[in-house]
Image (cartoon, rainbow, N blue to C red):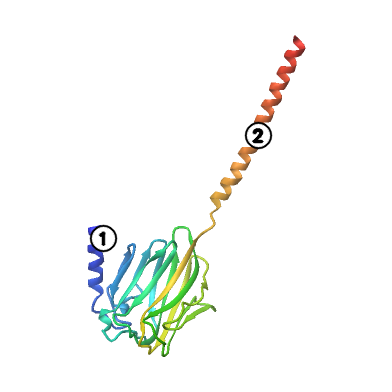
């Protein structure tokens, strides 16, 4: 545990200081239960985040992407972890609830260990009040997009399928209430052929067992009949 915490601190320290979206950073492979680090813009195409049964790779920023609070982007963070069960959260957190900017972040989500991608959802977080402007959307790379408003309710669920999908989060806000944006990704177990084959095998075995019991009963009946005739 101490070694894991130390590695996490070292990784966060290596990435601190590259605070402008699209800036360069040392490549890293994160395989931890959850992770939070400074420098949202430090995510690069060579980074790999593996949390449980979900892996994110191939981060790329849209041209001119910006997003930061007045506290300075060096104090903003990105976190990734599980929200319970097979629901995973990828979230940007502003140090001060007044993040502004526009842009997009594209990455590939991979389901691991016999899991399948199921649904995706996006949401803004912030303090109470009326949003002034902004949109946040999550696209699965084809035709389906889930959209939510700053300070409002989360979007509906975006259908996902297969073991790998390209996702793009797009934002535009001048809302002084925005403190974070997040994507929720749901997984589901993949149908496995082994349980089906096992059920078929069990059914065949039970039929054989019933036949043997029936034949055994018939044999016992014949023996009793022969004894009766002999008497």
How many numbered marks are there?
2
Instruction: Pinpoint residue 182: horizontal percent, then vertical percent.
Output: 40, 75
Residue at far front of view: 128
Q: Residue at x 51, y 75 (%)?
A: 156
Residue in the foreground of this view, choosing between 153 and 75: 153
Helix, strand or loop status at disc 1: helix
Residue at far top of view: 231
Image-quadrant location for residue 225: top right
Instruction: Pinpoint residue 131: horizontal percent, then vertical percent.
Output: 41, 87
Q: Residue at x 53, y 78 (%)?
A: 144
Q: Residues within 10 Å of mark 2 (few under 14, many from 20)?
A: few
Let me know if residue 228 appears in the view: yes
Q: Residue at x 67, y 33 (%)?
A: 211
The quadrant of the rendering that contains the N terminus is: bottom left
Q: Which mark is residue 210?
A: 2
Q: Residue at x 24, y 62 (%)?
A: 5
Q: Would you place residue 168 above or below residue 28 in this image?
A: below
Image-quadrant location for residue 208: top right
The quadrant of the rendering that contains the C terminus is: top right
Helix, strand or loop status at disc 2: helix
Q: Would you place residue 53 above or below residue 89 in this image?
A: above
Let me know if residue 27 appears in the view: no
Residue position for label 1: 4
Q: Which mark is residue 168?
A: none
Mark earlier in primary sequence (2, 1)? 1
């Amino acid at each position: 545990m101490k070694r894991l915490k130390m590695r996490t601190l070292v990784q966060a320290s290596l990435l601190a200081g590259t605070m402008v979206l699209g800036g360069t950073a040392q490549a890293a492979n994160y395989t931890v239960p959850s992770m939070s680090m400074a420098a949202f813009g430090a995510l690069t195409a060579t980074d790999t985040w593996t949390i449980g049964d979900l892996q994110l790779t191939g981060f790329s920023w849209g041209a001119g992407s910006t997003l930061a609070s007045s506290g300075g982007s060096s104090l903003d963070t990105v976190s990734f972890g599980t929200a319970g069960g097979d629901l995973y959260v990828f979230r940007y957190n502003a140090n001060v609830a007044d993040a502004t900017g526009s842009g997009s972040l594209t990455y590939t989500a991979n389901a691991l260990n016999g899991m399948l991608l199921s649904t995706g959802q996006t949401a803004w977080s912030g303090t109470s009040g009326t949003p002034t402007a902004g949109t946040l959307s999550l696209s699965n790379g084809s035709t389906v997009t889930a959209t939510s408003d700053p300070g409002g309710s989360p979007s509906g669920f975006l259908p996902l399928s297969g073991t790998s999908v390209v996702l793009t989060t797009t934002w535009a806000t001048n809302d002084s209430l925005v403190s974070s944006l997040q994507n929720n990704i749901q997984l589901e177990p993949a149908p496995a052929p082994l349980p089906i084959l096992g059920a078929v095998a069990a059914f065949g075995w039970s039929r054989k067992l019933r036949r043997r019991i029936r034949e055994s009963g018939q044999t016992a009946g014949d023996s009793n009949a022969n004894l009766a005739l002999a008497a």
